[in-house]
Amino acid sequence: MATSPSSSVSAAAPTERYSGVAIHLHWLMAAVLLLVFLVGVFMGDLKISPTRVRVFNWHKWIGIVALALASIRLLWRATHRAPGLPASIADWQRKVTGAAHGLLYALFFIVPLLGWAMSSAKGLPVVLFGKIPLPDFVPVDKALGKTLEDVHAFFAYTLASLAGLHIVAALHHRFMLHDGIMGRMLPAHGRRRGS
Ligand code: HEM
């Protein structure tokens, strides 16, 4: 739901919620990111085998799907206002929240783009679902590939840590502050008054 331009600071209003599209994109991306992260963490331990190649490919494909979802989400967010925060939220909290959400959006792009670049640099171009070859935007360069591998891992763990803090903050609002912040991002059946 788009809100009025004056709604960035408003009294707690249980009716002022994210739109259905925003809610679906949020939870779909959360699920996809969790999946691609867990596959990424565990695939490194697989022995050289056809299974390892398949799992690596699925990691890449799910990562590209996450990148596509991030693009749709950014487009949606740029064209639809998020509901304003209740007046009970202090100024410093608004700033921290804004910075954290901005950083999350940036990482939604940085992490998969680094993975894609790494694959190109290693000379293993991405063929989405084994059918659609994606362009290489960096040249084959093994040393660069190794560096990008480390940087991809670093930012993937940064994204996971920030997402972890985001979850802790949301749970704090739902179970300690009861200020309705988390309920605004829950599908209708997961909501309850003042949560
Ligand atoms: C948001 C999306 C993504 C997340 C959260 C993510 C996360 C991760 C994680 C956690 C690892 C393991 C790092 C480590 O412990 O060393 C990893 C490895 C890897 N990722 Fe991603 N990744 C994403 C997207 C992509 C994409 C789009 C590609 C390629 C198109 C890709 C290619 C790879 C490769 C090839 C490795 C293994 C590097 C190696 O061990 O050789 N990733 N990723």
Image (cartoon, helix red, strand yellow):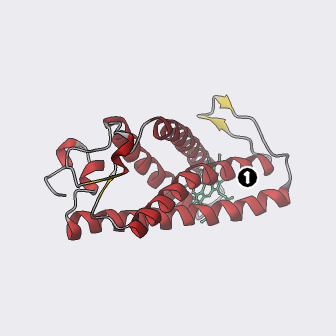
The x, y position of residue 91, in whole percent, is 40, 66
Q: Is residue 41 left or right of residue 17?
A: right
Residue 39 seen in render: no
Q: Is residue 195 left or right of residue 156?
A: left
Which corner quadrant holds the N terminus? top left
Report which quarter residue 155 is drawn in: bottom right
- The residue positioned 14% from the left and 52% from the top of the image is 192
Residue 69 seen in render: yes
The x, y position of residue 35, in whole percent, is 46, 52
The x, y position of residue 128, in whole percent, is 62, 35
The x, y position of residue 176, in whole percent, is 22, 71
Dot 1 corresponds to which residue? 118
Ligand 1, by image quadrant, is bottom right
In the structure shown, which secondary structural element does the residue marked by tag 1 occupy?
A: helix
Amino acid on which disc 1 is placed: Met
Q: Is residue 60 left or right of residue 117?
A: left
Report which quarter residue 131 is drawn in: top right
Q: Residue furthest left?
A: 193
Q: Residue furthest top?
A: 131
Who is closer to the viewer here, 99 or 141? 99
Who is closer to the viewer here, 44 or 81? 81
Q: Is residue 134 left or right of residue 159?
A: right
- The residue positioned 30% from the left and 49% from the top of the image is 185
Who is closer to the viewer here, 20 or 92? 92
- The residue positioned 24% from the left and 52% from the top of the image is 183
Which corner quadrant holds the C terminus? bottom left
Instruction: Please give the count of numbered marks on the rendered protein.
Output: 1
Q: Residues within 10 Å of mark 1 (few under 14, many from 20)?
A: many
- The residue positioned 17% from the left and 44% from the top of the image is 189
Q: Is mark 1 within 8 Å of ligand 1?
A: yes
